[in-house]
Image (cartoon, rainbow, N blue to C red):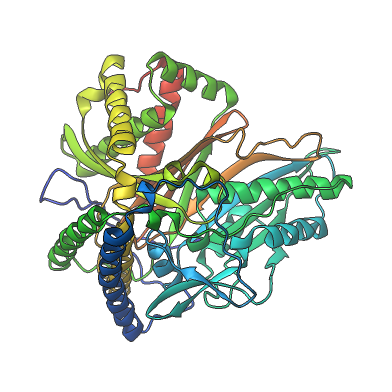
Amino acid sequence: MKSEEKDSTLLLSSQSDNIYIFPDAHETHSFLFNVYVNPTKILLFLGGNILCLLVAICFLAVYRSAKGGRQNGEEEETEPRKILTPPGGWLRPVSNTEMFAASAAFLGTGSTATVLWLSSLQSIRPEDVKQALSIIAQRIHVLQLCVAWRWFRPWLRRMKNVVVDFSVDTGDAMSVYYQQMRTPYNISQGPLWRARLVPQPQAAAGSHQAVLVLAIHHVITDGFTNMIISRDFMEVLNAIMTGRSYNTPTRYNIPAITNDLLSMRNYIYCFKEVLLTTYKSIARMFIFSHPETKVAFTKVLYKDFSAETTQELLRHCKEANVSIHSSIVAAAYLALLRTAQKHLKVKKDSLSITYDDSVNMRRFFPSIYKDSVGFHVSFCRLEHTVCSSDAESKKNFWKLARSIHCGLHHFLDANKAPLLASPVSWILAVLEQANYVLTRLGYKNAIITNMTISNMGNLKHLLPGQYGDGPVAISSLLRSVACEFLGCPFLLNFHTLDGRFSISLDCYINNVAEDFANNFFSYLTNYVADISQCGTISCL
């Protein structure tokens, strides 16, 4: 991916201390996506969303008053509910949490990517990879889904035939990644996923490398599901290459469990957010300048840390009684403040930051659904004011990290904020449509958060690097999501694979200048290294 750029500057909102990051002028490019959205379809989509939301509120109120919420019922499920649909049959309406991903699908974006760097004692043959993909496509039923309109809203539908979109590409693995993230899916026909194998030069005798790029649309998957798919694939591939049998389970489609957990309080909260978001979006439409960019694309930056650095980072976090998650968020706060200070060229000692934490909603599900596949994610929005003094001493830094740690757990465990906010996905769907139009007209997008964070934690059990005595192992992993129209400049992803901490940054170039993103990621990775070495970061 190459693009010519003019000198860029950083524009910050003057309304509050919150930082709102927008790109400056870029050279005009051709449209990123190969599909154009008819304005009539956008209006129908918005009208259908509002109508369905009102109808859902009415039906939910009647249902709650007549039978009470499912979460208050006395019967506890002992077996997970499964949806068995014949080929070509309708599965269910897109759920509240899936709505923004469905909206992105019709705009030609919203793909996730899981990039696996593979090392093997044997040659990794494309026919073995395709056979393994075919097996998991049969056993993991979300890989058989597509999305189509029915009754004024998107529905999940089972494909008539299982299709495996697989090919072998040559060249640079990241070039293949960018190509797959930019290529739209056939949403109504499927498949909503594809795989590309990129063989790598043999480094030494008996050592074979390859990169597998798994692109799956967000409407049928989330980070947890991508790890399950990758793990099942690795187990089947190793079994095929050693001539052994495999016993990966069949993973069925399930109902929209999150919808069962909602109450009228959730929809009232959603209505309040609709009014607030609409007001902010309309207000900013009149103050936007007219940049010379009409495209939206994702640029990714990533870094793997050594096992020694990871162990030291973990040791310092344990000593401070703080999770790695909170320490990385604290470092990201300070990196964002440092970057803003550099681009503003004025002394700014504090910054109010809003970020969304991606939350696995299975934590609220009955335990029998803990390994369910599909899209089951919501967001927990947190706000914090970070100051330059937070980096002046080790004590101040860990005080900031503990504050973030306590705040996050309060919202997750006490308030159950992600459950409360799950209907907000409808708002995000509307926001995506508006930002799509603004981008195509050359206007800046409406920004509603400074960054989104996705942490998969330690993947030791969810996605091991080694698979018994099998020949193929995962040496590195990159996770990425293209959500350019969600009103967010960054998506920060991190995890620990095989004892090594990795961090990546998805930069949405229609929302943030590339030099700002590069500086932010550079400061952040340096701060992570500082924490592992001396337990704090260098002063701002």
Q: Quadrant of the C terminus?
A: top left
Residue 229 drawn above or below residue 153: above
Q: Is residue 512 visible?
A: no
Residue at figure coordinates x 45%, y 47% from the top left: 75
Residue 521 placement: quadrant: top left
Q: Is residue 495 visible?
A: yes
> Where's residue 500, x and y in %?
58, 30
| Left or right, 378 with reference to 147 | left
Residue at figure coordinates x 61%, y 78% from the top left: 88
Residue 411 placement: quadrant: top left
> Where's residue 526, x and y in %?
42, 30
Residue 449 drawn above or below residue 185: above
Residue at figure coordinates x 68%, y 40% from the top left: 474
| Left or right, 471 with reference to 417 | right
Residue at figure coordinates x 54%, y 45% from the top left: 368
**Number of on-image labels:** 0
Residue 336 placement: quadrant: top left
| Left or right, 239 with reference to 417 | right
> Where's residue 155, x and y in %?
46, 73
Q: Residue furthest right?
A: 243
> Where's residue 62, x and y in %?
27, 65
